Amino acid sequence: MSSLSVYHVSSPDIPNKVLTHFEDIASTLAEQGVRFDRWQAAAKIQPGASQEEVIAAYQEQIDRLMTERGYITVDVISLSSDHPQKAELRAKFLDEHRHAEDEVRFFVAGRGLFTLHIDDYVYAVLCEKNDLISVPAGTRHWFDMGEHPHFVAIRLFNNPEGWVANFTGDDIAGRFPRLED
């Protein structure tokens, strides 16, 4: 189940609120300029589907979002617990960073924890299958795929280079809960 836990930066052990209803999560994040949406596939996706098959199943929604927001590149990332570099890949995303463009992820399968640091609050968004999150350019955040990752996600970019992070150097990410497997 998708969820949103909101913390004050001074209290990383106790959330101010925890939301589990889609509408509550979406409206709370919208107040911060973050898009949270749900998509349904136009066709059934089989385990092990190719990038092309995954994109084709969501082509209508992808095209609409690319037109709306000017995204120019789309790809699919897939990671499972048997990946030989899972620990290194996890570590790459765990430090607070920002991007010069929106970070858009749609979870086709599995889950991941996007944690956003906005002003004096931290918003931990557990994204699961069918969840779309769009983190606005410049928003400080980090991502946790867990010790035993399992997810397939569609990524959309404005930048043809794809994922380019600017790390903040702040150690805040280490003080907040991680994704528990």
Image (cartoon, rainbow, N blue to C red):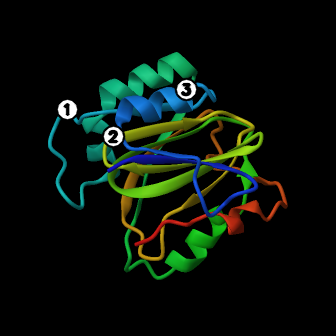
Q: Earlier in the sequence, mark 2 or mark 3?
A: 3
Q: Amino acid at mark 1?
A: Ala
> For the residue carrying disc 3, how many other residues have a C-alpha within 10 Å: few (<14), some (14-19), or many (20+)?
few
Residue identified by numbered label 1: 42
Q: Residue 181, image x and y in percent?
A: 40, 72
- Considering only vertical position in the picture, is 67 above or below 175? above
The numbered disc on residue 55 is 2
Figure disc tally: 3
Distance of label 3 from label 1 (alpha carbons): 26 Å
Q: Residue at x 37, y 47 (%)?
A: 2
Give the residue drawn at x 76%, y 55%. Answer: 10
The mark nearer the N terminus, 1 or 2, is 1
| Residue 11 circle label | none
Q: Secondary structure at mark 2?
A: helix
Front in this rendered view, residue 39 or 20: 20
Which residue is tagged 3? 30
Residue type at the position of mark 3: Ala
- SS class, disc 1: loop
Kindly give the residue lying farthest to the right in the view shown: 169
Residue 177 or 35: which is nearer the viewer? 177
Q: Position of residue 175 (x, y in %)?
A: 70, 67
The residues bearing labels 1 and 2 have C-alpha atoms spaced at a distance of: 10 Å
With respect to residue 107, does 95 lie above or below? below
Category of crowding for the residue at label 1, using alpha-carbon neighbours closer than 10 angstroms: few (below 14), some (14–19), many (at least 20)? few
